[in-house]
Image: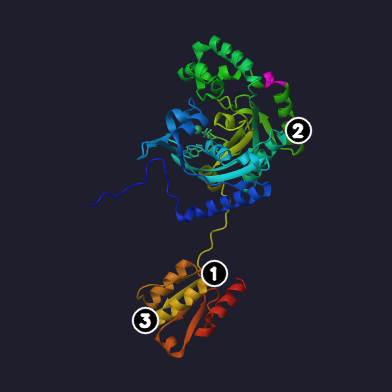
Amino acid sequence: MAKRFQNPKGTRDVLPEEQHYWRRIESVFQRLSDVYGFEKLTLPIFEETSLFQRGVGETTDIVEKEMYTFEDKGGNSMTLRPEFTAGVVRSYIQNGMASLTNPVKVWSTGPVFRYERPQAGRYRQFTQFNVEAFGEIDPALDFEVMSLAWQLYDELQFKNLSFQLNSIGCPVCRPGYLEQLKSYYHKNLHIVCDDCKSRLDKNPLRLLDCKNVQCQPTIQSAPAMKEHLCAECDDHFKTLLGYLDDMKRPYVINPRLVRGLDYYTKTVFEVWAEGIGAQNAVCGGGRYDGLAEMLGGKPTPGIGFAAGLERIVLTMQNQGVEVDPIPGPRVYFAPMGDAAKRASVRLITELRLQGIESVIGFGGRSFKALMREANRRGVRLVCIMGEEEISKNVCQVKDMEGGEQKSISLEEVIPAVKEILSAGS
Ligand code: ATP
Ligand code: MG
């Protein structure tokens, strides 16, 4: 027997019965992006490997362990995108978006790839909704990006939303803080994990988000960036908090929330929601005022966030959020005999041209089999035709709601069907 294939580990097939969640989520994205003034940007799924090495950072888990990198037939190293931001910044620079009216605000969605250990809600191919805004340092923009994330989850009926928030400073104030953090860790080196020992030199800010139980007490007592912000960063952070207070958005200032690389600056945030299990974060984002320059552009501030769609779907399913099903067919054609089939094919083609969801019974099925299919498809109307109907140039139109059946001349079938359907349920 020929080999039967399986989807690759860490990927999933989204079957038709789950698609109504996806459609709902996507329609909320699209609408809210319009409401907040973000335009859609569609990007390639793979980019030059070095873009991600620089844009995500050599010392991150993503670049060190998780990228799907391959050499193409021209000998170039390519990587399936593990996130959106690097590609979006690449596109902003390449397409001269700095000369547009700034801020430039864009959103994207699609698959991203990370070679991770698959588990519930953690896949090797997953889907992100990604938002970026460039060219403005005003904390009102930070608030806007955070608000969009918030409203997204709120409209999808996530419960008990709150922000986790931090400021990681900037190249002016962070180096001094990092020195303090490092000397604190040097004193505690005997009680932290091996990963943290290597982070100390490579990427000290990342010490603060170590998940290892053994390192938690050290993290708890570590000096906090917030106490070391320069006047500009402190003012930026306080202004942002003011907007959040005004709108009564609950937030927790979490000094362990960090991004490990120099080009990430100031605001870092996550949205948390109830019932996500061990990982409460439903999306994460922050500022990266140094990234555009790092990727060869002019210095350009930026802020964005990314949300994982699979985790949104899982949460909606777990919390029993009701989502309207995608409408199925409303009309079923049940022809018996060649002449009836021909007339039915003609009618259904016309009906579909007019946008009415309709399906037809194929092959030479019996009346009973046709009616069984019509039932299973859940249609409102069945158009039944056999030899007798053809000889009289009519069609029997049966209303499955109430069971009424009328004989309608073929010329009148389409307007009659449309009228019954538009008369409502
Ligand atoms: P985590 O801490 O769960 O690994 P992360 O910090 O790596 O998340 P980001 O890079 O900020 O996540 O990506 C944004 C969002 O993408 C996450 O909040 C999550 O919803 C989703 N996400 C990240 N990794 C995966 C994955 N392997 N499978 C499914 N969704 C994911
Ligand atoms: Mg991760």
* Residue at left offset 63%, top offset 52%: 31
Which dot marks residue 242? Answer: 2
Separation of residues labelled 3 and 2 (CA atoms): 74 Å
Separation of residues labelled 2 and 1 (CA atoms): 50 Å
| Image-quadrant location for residue 292 | top right
Amino acid bearing label 1? Gly
Res 337 visible:
no
N-terminal label among 3 and 2: 2
Task: Give the number of the mark in front: 3 or 1.
Answer: 1
Residue 87 appears at what percent x and percent y? 52, 38
- Quarter of the image with the C terminus is bottom right
Task: Give the number of the mark in front: 2 or 1.
Answer: 1
Given the current orientation, which residue lies at the most extreme bottom position? Answer: 392
Helix, strand or loop at label 2? It is helix
| Image-quadrant location for residue 174 | top right
Residue situated in front as seen by the camera: 132 or 425? 132
Please, is residue 374 above or below residue 128 in the view? below
Lateral position of residue 368 relative to residue 288, left or right:
left
Amino acid bearing label 3? Asp
Helix, strand or loop for the magenta stretch, by majority: helix
Lateral position of residue 115 relative to residue 200, left or right:
left
N-terminal label among 2 and 1: 2
Give the residues in magenta. 226-230
Please, is residue 273 above or below residue 202 in the view? below
Residue situated in front as seen by the camera: 295 or 368? 295
Residue 15 appears at what percent x and percent y? 44, 53
- Check disc 1 and report the residue beneath it: 355
Q: Report crowding for label 2: few under 14, some 14 to 19, many 20 or more residues within 10 A (C-alpha).
A: some
Which dot marks residue 225? Answer: none
* Residue at left offset 68%, top offset 43%: 101
